[in-house]
Amino acid sequence: MRSTLVRRSVLTASAVSLALLVTACGSDKAAKDEPKGGGASSAAPSAPAADPAAKAKTAAELKAQLVTQADLAEYKVKEAAPDEVTGAAAAYATTKAECQPLAQAMSGAGVGKSVGSAATKVSSVPKAPAADASPEEKLKAIKDAAGVTVTMVSLSSYDGKGAADAFAAVKAAGTACVAGYPGAKESDTGKVTKVTEGTPVSAGDEAVAFAVERDADGDKLATQLVVVRKGNTLASFYSLSPLTAAAQPKAIVDAQVKKLG
């Protein structure tokens, strides 16, 4: 029988590659707020109206706006390969159409029909053991390295009111899919068992946060999703760890929204 670690690692690998050689010292400074239950959280009760004449940014323009290592010195930042995004989109797809916007936001793919998109991965950096660390401390360091939290950060841009429509679709999906939804294939990687309200986020023109419980071959994996609209750009942040409940990536959200202007 496979161990819990193996099962969860398989799920994580289908979404975001954890093959990051993490040897630098540091710590995950992301916010540790616990998610709240029931529905979706939105920062702005009355969001600024979308500009119907707005022109979408290209993939190259969005790539230039993604957070980099210079913006998040205490994390490890690495560009997401195209096959990672397409692979995650396939793994997270669902047969329940009203839940598809959530699946798209989690995979790093654009929600709906975006014009341009770009994605990167941000990983927490576990503290390396001291030179004179005990065997127990070294074992803990190995476990911490295996259980890093990885956040897929993706930007998608739309013409006109497309970003506002995509944001509304994600928010509606959070309400329609509280009981979870099946994957598109006969595997456990796309199965979501519960969607609840996340810690409220105040960012951009409007924001929504969810705590998403996934089924990792019978084990529960607690993940976090934040989606922010800034003008005609949608920023999605999906965090997961194979060993522990992921915390909402507040520091990453703040840094990325700041780069969007």
Image: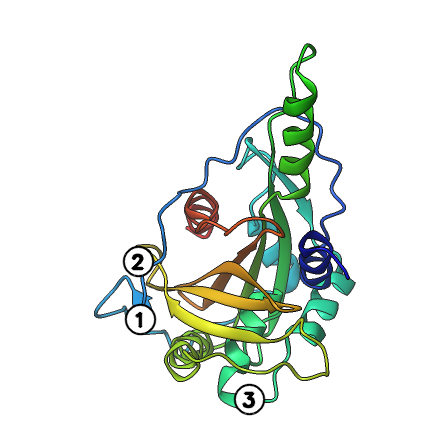
Circles 2 and 3: CB atoms closer than 8 Å: no
Tell me the SS state at disc 3.
loop
- Mark found first going from the N terminus, 2 or 3: 3
Residue nearest the viewer, comparing 223 with 205: 223
Total numbered labels placed on residues in the image: 3
Amino acid carrying mark 1 in the image: Gly
What's the CA distance linking mark 2 and mark 1? 12 Å
Query: Where's residue 133, x and y in %?
Result: 66, 15
Using residue 167 as the reference point, say whether residue 40 is left or right of it: left
Quadrant of the frame with the N terminus: bottom right
- Callout 3 crowding tier (Cα within 10 Å): few <14, some 14–19, many ≥20: few
Q: What amino acid does circle 2 point to?
A: Pro
Query: What residue is shown with label 2?
Result: 200
Per the image, the residue denoted by label 3 is 96
User: What label does residue 38 carry, if any?
Assistant: 1
Query: Mark 3 or mark 1: which comes first in sequence?
Result: 1
Query: Which of the 4 quarters of the picture holds residue 202?
Result: bottom left
Q: Is residue 194 above or below residue 150?
A: below
